[in-house]
Image (cartoon, helix red, strand yellow):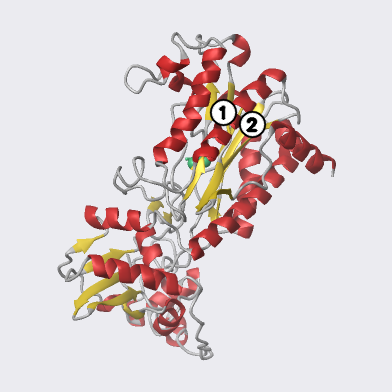
């Protein structure tokens, strides 16, 4: 990694695949550049929210030196890296998100009244350095200019200093610390107004991405790897209108829909099958949507597909109906599972009654057809608040301001001998993003059609329109 410290131009590097920089270049490269205009940004919208979060962290870790690293570029191969993604705790506490400079560090230094907080990052290099023109990882000639210390301080409302001044020294608490991970996760269980609005917008863009997918389905059906066509269409929307996808798109057609995290996406999209698409746009703030729709490729559900689809919808609606402040998170899952167990028992798939299957110790037979949970918290991470204690999460009580998914499914594997042949190879999931308010749940993704009839009308509208 480059420290950003100035190398002198006399030491310009020589590599095995480039001509060395000749004297004339070295003598002139630092000169002839216009002054940079230094317009100070006004503080971004999330700055005040991030300040409030830092105050909460400061009060919880009195007298401790906290060192919170954004993380570094990760090598993909040779001299190519994965796209940089700041650590979620860092982004949450700074408000610096998609535009975070790699290797930045947020430091809480104990001070009388709490902590002095400083954000260290690699400020842009002077044009008299070799970094400016010769460093392909961080140099301005290669990846574009970095902001100044003053601009970031104004943008985020945090004191800034150059990374070279960061004294790593002894830290009482780092990003690896379990107490900090737990605290930061539980701090995110209830979202603030900024976070809620970001997720609303992420869902809105994701809805447009699903429209794009439906428009592309006929083309996907003609391509040997139609699932990739679907993935690519969504990627375009995610990159054009957001920062990208919040997680790898699951584009799972036909029997692939039964593989819960199918991201190979290299299969055909066959008319007559269903395609399950689980996809979410992440905003520049890093808040993401997480939506699944299961679509009939030819625009119409068959009778058996419809029966499975409507059962999953019934389970989702049952979960939605119990979600309100004061009930336990786990009750949402239990409501969905009650419907799944009842229906698969009615269809004769279980060796026991629905009641027996729902027994917490001796049952679970119905889980063969839906092994995953019904809900997870959603936010800056798709599976947000992951280090919250179980008593705050699965066994925790729902509060207004929480945002979570409701995503039941039914999956009948292609070779599952416990189900009739007509069900084999059918996988359905319906996933919505829910904001809990004092008045009950609000489905943030209600505008993305859900019922079988509405999905059919949606496909017809987009493909005929
Ligand atoms: N997209 C992963 C999930 O739904 O949890
Ligand atoms: Mn999910
Ligand atoms: Mn999902």
Identify the disc placed on residue 275.
Answer: 2
Say how many tags the image has: 2
Residue at mark 1 to residue at mark 2: CA–CA distance = 7 Å
Q: How far across and how far down the image is residue 121, in percent?
A: 35, 74
Pointer 1: what residue?
Answer: 257
* Whether residue 140 is situated above or below residue 411 in the rendered picture: below
Q: In this image, 199 relative to 181: left or right?
A: right
Q: Secondary structure at mark 1?
A: helix
Q: Residue at x 68, y 51 (%)?
A: 208
Asked where in the image residue 81 lies, by quadrant, the reply is bottom left
Q: Residue at x 54, y 29 (%)?
A: 409
| Callout 2 crowding tier (Cα within 10 Å): few <14, some 14–19, many ≥20 | many
Give whichever of 189, 140 is nearer the camera: 189
Identify the disc placed on residue 327.
Answer: none
The C terminus, quarter of image: top right
Asked where in the image residue 270 lies, by quadrant, the reply is top right
Q: In this image, 386 relative to 147: left or right?
A: left
Q: How far across and how far down the image is residue 2, in percent?
A: 33, 69
* Whether residue 118 is situated above or below residue 97 in the rendered picture: below
**Furthest residue in direction left, as rendered:** 170
| Callout 1 crowding tier (Cα within 10 Å): few <14, some 14–19, many ≥20 | many
Residue 87 makes an appearance in the image? no
């Amino acid at each position: 990694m480059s420290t950003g410290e100035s190398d002198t131009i006399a030491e310009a590097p020589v590599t095995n695949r480039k001509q060395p920089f000749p004297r004339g270049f070295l003598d002139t490269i630092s000169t002839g550049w216009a002054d940079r205009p230094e317009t100070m940004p006004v503080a971004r919208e999330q700055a005040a929210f991030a300040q409030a979060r830092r105050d909460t962290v400061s009060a919880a870790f009195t007298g401790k030196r906290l060192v919170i690293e954004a993380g570094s570029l990760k090598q993909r191969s040779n001299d190519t890296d994965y796209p940089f993604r700041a650590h979620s705790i860092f982004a949450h506490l700074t408000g610096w998100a998609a535009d975070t400079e790699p290797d930045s560090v947020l430091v809480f230094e104990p001070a009388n009244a709490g902590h002095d907080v400083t954000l260290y990052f690699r400020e842009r290099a002077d044009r008299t350095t070799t970094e400016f023109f010769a460093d392909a990882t961080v140099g301005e000639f290669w990846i574009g200019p970095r902001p100044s210390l003053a601009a970031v301080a104004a943008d985020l409302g945090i004191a800034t200093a150059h990374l070279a001044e960061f004294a790593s020294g002894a830290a009482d608490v780092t990003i690896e610390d379990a107490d900090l991970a737990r605290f930061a996760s539980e701090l995110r269980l209830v979202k603030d107004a900024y976070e809620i609005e970001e997720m609303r917008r992420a869902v809105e863009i994701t809805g447009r991405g699903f429209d794009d997918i439906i428009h592309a389905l006929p083309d996907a059906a003609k391509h040997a790897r139609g699932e990739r066509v679907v993935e690519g269409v969504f990627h375009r929307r995610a990159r054009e209108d957001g920062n990208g996808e919040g997680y790898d798109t699951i584009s799972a057609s036909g029997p692939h829909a039964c593989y819960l995290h199918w991201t190979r996406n290299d299969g055909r999209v066959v008319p007559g099958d269903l395609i399950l698409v689980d996809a979410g746009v992440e905003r520049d703030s890093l808040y993401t949507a997480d939506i699944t729709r299961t679509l009939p490729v030819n625009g119409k559900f068959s009778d058996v597909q419809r029966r499975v689809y409507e059962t999953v919808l019934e389970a989702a609606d049952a979960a939605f109906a119990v979600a309100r402040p004061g009930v336990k998170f786990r009750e949402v899952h239990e409501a969905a599972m009650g419907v799944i167990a009842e229906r698969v028992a009615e269809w004769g798939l279980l060796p026991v009654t629905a009641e027996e299957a729902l027994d917490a110790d001796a049952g679970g037979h119905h889980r063969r057809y839906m092994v995953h949970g019904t809900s997870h918290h959603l936010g800056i991470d798709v599976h947000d608040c992951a280090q919250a204690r179980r008593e705050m999460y699965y066994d925790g009580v729902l509060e207004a301001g929480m945002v979570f998914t409701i995503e039941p499914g039914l999956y009948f594997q292609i070779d599952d001998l416990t189900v009739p042949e007509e069900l084999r190879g059918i996988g359905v999931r319906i996933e919505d993003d829910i904001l809990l308010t004092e008045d009950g749940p609000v489905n943030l993704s209600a505008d993305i059609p859900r019922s079988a009839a509405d999905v059919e009308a949606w496909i017809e509208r987009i493909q005929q329109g």
